[in-house]
Amino acid sequence: MALPQVVIQPQAAKRVRHHDGWIFRDELVRAPADLPAGELVEAITDGGGFAAICAFNPASHIVLRVFTTIPGDTIDRAWLARRMARAVAKRIALTGTDAKRLIFSEADGLPGLIADQYGAHLVIQIRTAGMERLRDLVVDLLQEQLQPAGILERSDKEFRQEEGLAPTAGVLRGAVPDRILIREEPWQFWVDPHRGLKTGFYLDQRLTRRKLREAVAPNQRVLDAFSYTGSLGIAAATGGARVVCVEQQEPFLELAKENAKLNGVADRMEFVAGNAFYWLDAQAKGSTRYDWVLLDPPALAKSKAAVHQGRQALHHLLVHGLRALAPEGRMLVSVCTYHLLRNLEEIVRIAAGDDDVRLTVRDQWAQASDHPWILQLPATRYLVSWVLACDAPSTA
Ligand SMILES: C[S@@+](CC[C@H](N)C(=O)[O-])C[C@H]1O[C@@H](n2cnc3c(N)ncnc32)[C@H](O)[C@@H]1O
């Protein structure tokens, strides 16, 4: 059946042919009246040239999300099954863990679909109107292809608002327990898929855990300032460090304590329920100094409008984090705020200037490989981590 056609600007069509996946509202020339949100459409240029098959959503500033640029493709069960199987197959090489992202939205050519594996269970998010319409097919296919013991949906986040979708969460297939034990060698972690952040665990920080374990030395003092369920602090404690975890949500801190016990490092870890901003200020003014300060704050600016405030918050954390460092200390800073990570270099330089310290960037990396960064889709690079070292300039 022929799809409705919408007309887009030539430069948008060009971008899409070069593997960009989004068309913005101001790039839409015209669309049939009353096209419902989520409808699959053919995006063409005014001359009639085919650009892509997309999901349309007039409510979103991303008015079209590309499903395919192959003319004649049909977005049906078989097409979805192929894309999903391909995404899963790409993660087979990721071993040593039974917790990974199997489908990462646009990066896997499935705009709006997230599927994370936690042991025998799947936790999914449906983020867009286009994917919402394919929900039943997607869930059937996940069950058929992966045979999980249960599928939980966690589409209960603010990202659905802009798509005009109501938040929703619940078990869609089988059963999903309150807690799932996952393995990420050499660790095990309890995950709360129903109440945890994201889909339950920061799968995207896998590389950060590994790097920390390698970099932290026995008996070093580590401050894990936004600890959630403790994964970074536990990684540092595994290397023999003594760690203080600060987290404002007590249920997360309780899980962090259990995770510390599970991994045999509870005797080297302390847990503080509180506001990390105030805690850091107090540490900066006090006498305790840390060999490592780990800063993995939540998104500090959720929109372009909030960038200024976000910059100030990050600046504050960096300045106080630097003051809490021992001589030769290191700071790990992870930024998951798209609008800030593009300016991270400048923000860190200004913060270092405030304290008159010379900083060396010792290492940097992005999100874990099961959350691939597609060069033509800048928003898929959403998490960066830097290791900063205070370094006195040579006077020789
Ligand atoms: C990005 S997550 C940290 C993830 C963690 N590093 C991990 O790998 O599991 C940010 C955490 O900071 C917590 N948080 C947010 N604002 C906070 C504040 N002002 N003080 C302390 N914790 C805060 C959130 O509850 C969340 O658990």
Image (cartoon, grey):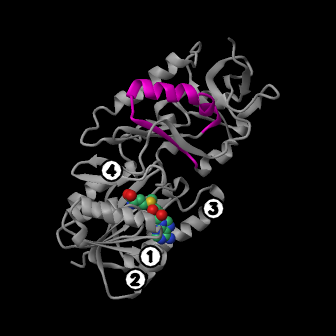
Decide: few, some or many residues near mark 1? Use Cα within 10 Å; few <14, some 14-19, many ≥20. many
Q: Closer to the camera: disc 1 or disc 2? A: 2
Tell me the CA gap for discs 1 and 4: 26 Å
- Label whose residue precedes the other's in the sequence (4 or 3): 4
Amino acid carrying label 3: it is Ala
Q: Closer to the camera: disc 4 or disc 2? A: 4
Task: Say if mark 3 contacts mark 2, CB within 8 Å.
Answer: no
For the point 67% across and 42% down, which residue is it? 165
For the point 28% across and 63% down, which residue is it? 260
Amino acid carrying label 4: it is Arg
Task: Say if mark 1 contacts mark 2, CB within 8 Å.
Answer: yes
Residue linked to disc 1: 319
Amino acid carrying label 1: it is Val
Tell me the CA gap for discs 1 and 2: 9 Å
Quick one: 225 or 395, which is closer to the camera? Answer: 225
Where disc 4 sits, the SS reads helix
Tell me the CA gap for discs 4 and 3: 28 Å
Residue linked to disc 2: 284
Q: Closer to the camera: disc 1 or disc 4? A: 4
- Label whose residue precedes the other's in the sequence (1 or 4): 4
Which circle marks residue 206 in the picture?
Answer: 4
Task: Say if mark 1 contacts mark 4, CB within 8 Å.
Answer: no
Decide: few, some or many residues near mark 3? Use Cα within 10 Å; few <14, some 14-19, many ≥20. few
Amino acid carrying label 2: it is Ala
Query: Can residue 393 be seen from the camera position used here?
Result: no
Q: Position of residue 66 (x, y in %)?
A: 59, 29
Q: Is residue 279 left or right of residue 244?
A: right
